[in-house]
Amino acid sequence: MDIFRIEGPVRLSGGVTVNGSKNASLPIMAATILAGGKSVLSAVPHLSDISVCSQLLSELGCKVTRNKNGDLCIDSTVIDNPVGDYEIVRRMRASICILGPLLARCGRAEVSMPGGCAIGYRPIDIHLRGLRELGAKIHIRNGYVIAEAKNGLTGKELFMGGPFGSTVLGTANVLMAATLAKGRTVIESAACEPEIADLANCLNKMGAKITGIGSPRLVIEGVKQLHPVEYEVIPDRIEAGTFMVAAAITAGQLQMHNCRLDDMMAVVDKLRSIGVTIEATDDGCVVARNGSIKPADITTQPYPGFPTDLQAQFMALLSLADGNSIIIEKIFPDRFMHVAELSRMAANLRKEGPTVLVAGVKKLIAAPVMASDLRASAALVLAGLAAEGTTTVNRVYHIDRGYERIEERLNPAGAKIIRESV
Ligand code: EPZ
């Protein structure tokens, strides 16, 4: 198992290139199930979650390889085992997004129900409700979702809002299934996240007829078949946001390449109010902080609101603010595994339900800490860059799920992160 030893404090200065989006890549990989033949996806990052998804597709019957350019090639000519096994799904919840495309392509799918999750209870009831509305017969047996649509799916107008707003992968599942349904589907209260827009754009390139992309009302005219695709996934806005916080927390300056500010308005707005400057460039931006960190209030929301996937990283940043901040988590109310670990680094945090009061401190102090989930772990790395002393982050595999070799990308800009196998 790898650990990080992070020496701080440092001041980052240099450039960093943002990778393709993990959360766009995963549903797009699943979308290749919809069309027999060989698809080529570029800018898919080298992450453990991508490897798990590749294994999942291989078990269905697909052939998944990387070509010499690093593109991910998925040959989905044969799908002869429409089963998402528990052993894979338990390693990555996003596996559930094969359910819709398998059902549409094979008329049947068996996918393990995702189990517990470090960021809280994550039901899939809205996914199932949506697929049922399209005519699927669904039941749960031995921990598996068994879905059938022997005579195909039929388009329908359906509402996909839930207690916390829209659902990203629920929208992905129903959207993919609807592309091959008979007639027109309208998804009202669809997720508007850029990753869903990217999926919809990829599906259209495969021959689907989707309009309203990027809006909460997606309209899908079903087609008889889709064809394989060559597609490049969008840059990862969460990785970009994490690097922006790295520049901010170290009072440094980073030139970010391959970064789409248009996808990050809530984040950019918040950083500016905190005292961070962000200047757009041709392929990204320059992020810098000179003055003190101003306190801020953050409420996570579905896109275009502030993303839950950057809540932990901003908590690390605001721990060093000149005053008190409030962070309210409205997507995953229990997503606070980082609070106890940041407190071990001398952050002054008080959690009350889905709210954390962050009283700014003058400095963070290094400590051994435990990575718990992907974004919580990223917050610990950020805190380690700014803390006095050597922070040890255990269970680095959580970080490797979503950030490709983060140490090799931040060290050239002045970070001192050493990976060790223990
Ligand atoms: C996606 O998860 C992302 N994962 C998550 O990123 C991200 O945190 C989340 O969206 C929210 O933005 C991928 O894209 C692979 P949701 P998803 O369904 O789709 C409730 C990361 O760190 N809900 O949009 O599973 C749910 O409990 C990860 O990269 C239901 O009630 O999230 C939550 O409160 C972690 N019923 C809210 O909706 C359902 O059927 C939003 O969840 C589905 C969801």
Image (cartoon, helix red, strand yellow):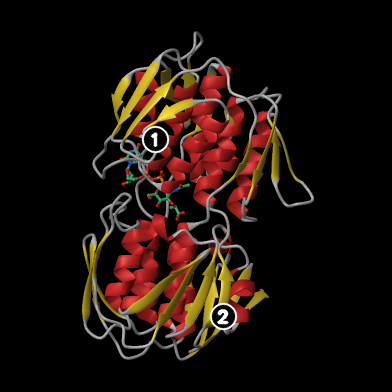
191 to the left or right of 108? left
Q: What is the tally of numbered marks visible in this picture?
A: 2
Residue 50 x/y as whole percent: 61, 49
Quarter of the figure with the N terminus: bottom right
- Which residue is pictured at 48% across the width and 64% down the height? 240
The residue under label 2 is 14
Residue 362 x/y as whole percent: 31, 91
Residue 307, by quadrant, is bottom left
The residue under label 1 is 171
180 to the left or right of 365? right
Up/down of 256 relative to 106, above or below? below
In the picture, the disc for residue 311 is: none
- Which residue is pictured at 44% across the width and 71% down the height? 244
- Precedes in sequence: disc 1 or disc 2: 2
Q: Nearer the viewer, mark 1 or mark 2?
A: 2
Amino acid type of the residue that numbered disc 2 sits on in the rendered structure:
Gly
- Return the residue nearer the eye: 144 or 17: 17
Helix, strand or loop status at disc 1: helix
Amino acid type of the residue that numbered disc 1 sits on in the rendered structure:
Thr
- Which residue is pictured at 58% across the width and 23% down the height? 226
